[in-house]
C-alpha cells in the first residue's frame, strides 16, 4: 500500500486502457473526471508503458496482459482501473467475453471492474447470458469472435487450464467479478443505481466506487431476496492530492455508517484512516493477500 492511499488491488494489469471522457477537453469533462488521476498517468511517463504513449481517450486492447491474468499463479486482486469497460462492450464484445472467461477460469483471483457507464454493461450482460441460455458460445459468431476463441484456446493450453474456454463458459456470472459503479456525486449515484439493480437481478455482483468523492452521498437502500444488499462492496477515496478537511470528513463517516447499517463491506482508500481506524473490508470470496 502507498503512503497516500490504500489501493484495494494487488495488481492492475488492465487488459484495456483509455476512456472516452478523456478525449474531451478538460473543461468539458464531468466534474469527477476533472479531478481524476488517470489523464495525467496515461499521458505521462507511466502512460508510455501502460498506454503506449497514445491519447488517453483512445481505447486500446492488450491481450497479453489478459493472458497474464490467466497464467499468474499467485491469487491476485485485479483492479482494471485504466480503461472504460463499457467501450469494450460496445466495440469489442468478443474481447469482453474473453475477460469474463478469464475470471471463470481463475476463481482464485478477484476482479474489480470500475465503470462510469453501467447502462452499456447491462446490455452486454443481457447479450452474453442469453447466448449461454440458448446453448451458444460466449464468443460472438463472427470473425473477431472466432479469433479470440482461438486465442483463448491457445492461452488456456499454455496456462494448463484444460479445455478453456469451452469448459469454463459458464455458469455466468463469475462470483469473483464485481462491476464497480463509479460516481462522485449524489446525482451520479442516483442515475446509475437502477443499472446496478439490473445487474444484480441477473446475478452479477455490483459495488460502488466513490472516487473522487465530491459531495455527501446517501447510499441507495436496495435489498434483494432474502434481504441481502444489492451492493457487494463500497470503495471511497478523495480526489488526487486532496486532503479532506472540516465538514468533508463527515461525508466519509456517513458512508462508513451506512455501510455498517446495510451490512456492506467498506474499503477506505483515502484518507487512510477515520478516527485513526483503517477500513479494509473485502468482498466475500476475494483473496485477502
Image (cartoon, grey):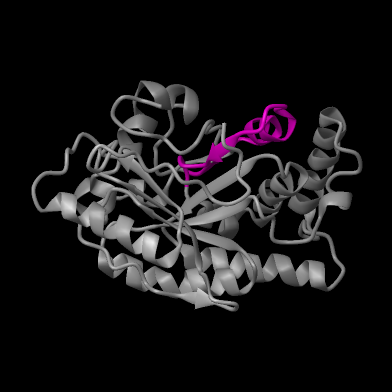
In this rendering, position of residue 47 left or right of residue 61: left
Most extreme residue toward the right, as rendered? 163
In this rendering, position of residue 148 left or right of residue 250: right
- Count of numbered circles on the image: 0
Q: Where is residue 251 in the image (x, y as percent from the top left)?
A: 21, 56
Q: Does the magenta stretch include residue 119?
A: no
In this rendering, position of residue 289 left or right of residue 19: right
Residue 25 shows up from this direction: no
Q: Position of residue 214 (x, y in %)?
A: 21, 54
Q: Please tell me whether residue 279 is drawn above or below residue 175 in the rendered image.
A: above
Tell me where the magenta segment starts and ends, as one range: 59-83
The quarter of the displayed image where residue 93 is located: bottom right
In this rendering, position of residue 211 left or right of residue 15: left
Q: Please tell me whether residue 38 is drawn above or below residue 213 in the rendered image.
A: above
Q: Where is residue 46 in the image (x, y as percent from the top left)?
A: 40, 23
The quarter of the displayed image where residue 75 is located: top right
Q: Which residue is rendered at x = 54% and y = 51% of the image?
A: 283
Quadrant for the C terminus, please.
Answer: top right
The foreground one among 30 and 211 is: 211
Q: Does the magenta stretch include residue 81?
A: yes
Q: Which residue is rendered at x = 42% and y = 47% of the image?
A: 19
Most extreme residue toward the bottom, as rendered? 225
Q: Which residue is rendered at x = 73% and y = 41% of the image?
A: 106
Amino acid at each position: 500500500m502507498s503512503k497516500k492511499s490504500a489501493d484495494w488491488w494487488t495488481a492492475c494489469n488492465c487488459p484495456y486502457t483509455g476512456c472516452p471522457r478523456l478525449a474531451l477537453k478538460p473543461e468539458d469533462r464531468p466534474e469527477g473526471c476533472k479531478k481524476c488521476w488517470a489523464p495525467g498517468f496515461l499521458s505521462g511517463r507511466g502512460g508510455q508503458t501502460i498506454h503506449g504513449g497514445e491519447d488517453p481517450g483512445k481505447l486500446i486492447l492488450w491481450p497479453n496482459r489478459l493472458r497474464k491474468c490467466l497464467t499468474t499463479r499467485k491469487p491476485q486482486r485485479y483492479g482494471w482501473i485504466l480503461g472504460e469497460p463499457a467501450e469494450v462492450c460496445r466495440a469489442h464484445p468478443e474481447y469482453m467475453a474473453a475477460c469474463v472467461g478469464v475470471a471463470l477460469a481463475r476463481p482464485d483471483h478477484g476482479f474489480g471492474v470500475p465503470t462510469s457507464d453501467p447502462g452499456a454493461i447491462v446490455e452486454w450482460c443481457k447479450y452474453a447470458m442469453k447466448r449461454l441460455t440458448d446453448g451458444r458460445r460466449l464468443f460472438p459468431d463472427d470473425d473477431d469472435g472466432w479469433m479470440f476463441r482461438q486465442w483463448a484456446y491457445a492461452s488456456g493450453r499454455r496456462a494448463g487450464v484444460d479445455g478453456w474456454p469451452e469448459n469454463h463458459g459458464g455458469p455466468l456470472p463469475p462470483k469473483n467479478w464485481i462491476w464497480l459503479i463509479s460516481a462522485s456525486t449524489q446525482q451520479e449515484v442516483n442515475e446509475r443505481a437502477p443499472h446496478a439493480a439490473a445487474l444484480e437481478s441477473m446475478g452479477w455482483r455490483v459495488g460502488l466506487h466513490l472516487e473522487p468523492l465530491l459531495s455527501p452521498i446517501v447510499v441507495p437502500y436496495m435489498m434483494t431476496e432474502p434481504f441481502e444488499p444489492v451492493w457487494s462492496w463500497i470503495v471511497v477515496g478523495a480526489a488526487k492530492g486532496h486532503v479532506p478537511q472540516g465538514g468533508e470528513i463527515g461525508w466519509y463517516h456517513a458512508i462508513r455508517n451506512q455501510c455498517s447499517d446495510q451490512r456492506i463491506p467498506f474499503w477506505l482508500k483515502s484518507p487512510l484512516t477515520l478516527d485513526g481506524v483503517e477500513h479494509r473490508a473485502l468482498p466475500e470470496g476475494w483473496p485477502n493477500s
